[in-house]
Amino acid sequence: MQNQLIVENLSCQRGEDILFGALNLCVKAGDFIQIEGHNGIGKTSLLRILAGLSRPLTGEVRWNDKSIYACREEYYHHLLYLGHYAGVKPELSAWGNLAFYQHTGFCRQGEEVLWQALQKVGLLGREDIQAGHLSAGQQRRIALARLWLSQAPLWILDEPFTAIDKKGVGILTELFENQADRGGMVILTSHQEVPSTALQILRLEKYKIGA
Ligand SMILES: Nc1ncnc2c1ncn2[C@@H]1O[C@H](COP(=O)(O)OP(=O)(O)OP(=O)(O)O)[C@@H](O)[C@H]1O
């Protein structure tokens, strides 16, 4: 069976506000989806619900026909979530961070792929510096380097292009297209245009309560 993420009748409340409701979505192998909408509409809130990090007001998220809360271990094995915070360990080097991720995540193994990942994100030559001493953009690149190691079928990425230059956006977009081509799934948010013809857009505005 191919992997599938099903979202049924999802609604989300934050504070006093219901941000969106009646959201249904079926994400299949090969899908590359951008969640679109203005600041504050609820994109991050939606991604956090899809990643199982917060609960919806109503509705359910299912991975391969099981509630994500009922198959947490399997789901987290299959999911790579990159949120606003890089999730990088400041006391470890770029190399150390990636080696740790390789050890704990669902990853391609071996030093060669780790060097390739460092090269892809432009951190060759800086691999031994403690991450905490690198710039915000360079720390972000350590987080993004995980994408080149990951074998997780589902990638949920909140603003992956933040602090990334135009060339980097092109390289990442190609990686996302490859992930979809090999039967994976990518769901992301972005405030900049994503240069891909494969991209499907989900406009959150459509699910705004009272819209
Ligand atoms: N834990 C919380 N408690 C109360 N309100 C919250 C909480 N988290 C988010 N919000 C509010 O929910 C709304 C949606 O936030 P969210 O971060 O999901 O929007 P977004 O579409 O990702 O925005 P942006 O494009 O600016 O990143 C905002 O008004 C925000 O202030």
Image (cartoon, rainbow, N blue to C red):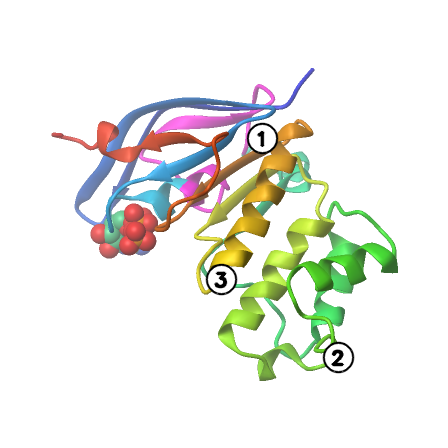
Q: Which region is colored magenta?
A: 47-68
Closer to the chain start, of discs 3 and 1, is 1
Residue 127 against residue 194 in the figure, above or below: below
Whether 166 is drawn above or below 66: the answer is below
Residue at screen point 46% across, 37% down: 50
- For mark 2, give the secondary structure: loop
Q: Are marks 3 and 2 in contact (CB under 8 Å)?
A: no
Q: Work out which quarter of the rendered image holds the C terminus and state it.
A: top left
Local crowd size for mark 2, using a 10 Å CA cut-off: few (<14), some (14–19), many (≥20): few
Residue at mark 3: 164
Label number found at residue 32: none
User: Is the residue at mark 1 in contact range of ligand 1, meaning its CB lies under 8 Å from it?
Assistant: no
Between circles 1 and 2, the one closer to the viewer is 2
| Residue 59 image point, x, y percent | 37, 26
Q: Residue at 77% across / 56% down in the picture?
A: 102
Mark 3 or 1: the one toward you: 3
Q: Is residue 48 left or right of residue 155?
A: left
Residue drawn where x is 45% and y is 65% of the image: 163
Q: Is residue 27 left or right of residue 18?
A: right
Q: Please, what is the three-letter code of the amino acid marked with disc 1?
A: Ala
Rendering coords of residue 30 (x, y %): 59, 25
**Is mark 1 in CB contact (under 8 Å) with mark 2?**
no
Residue type at numbered disc 3:
Ile
> In the rendered image, which quarter is residue 29 located in?
top right
* Local secondary structure at mark 1: loop
**What mark, if any, has residue 128 been given in the picture?**
2
Tell me the residue that label 1 is attached to. Answer: 70
Q: Quadrant of the N terminus?
A: top right
Q: Is mark 2 within 8 Å of ligand 1?
A: no
Q: Residue furthest left?
A: 210
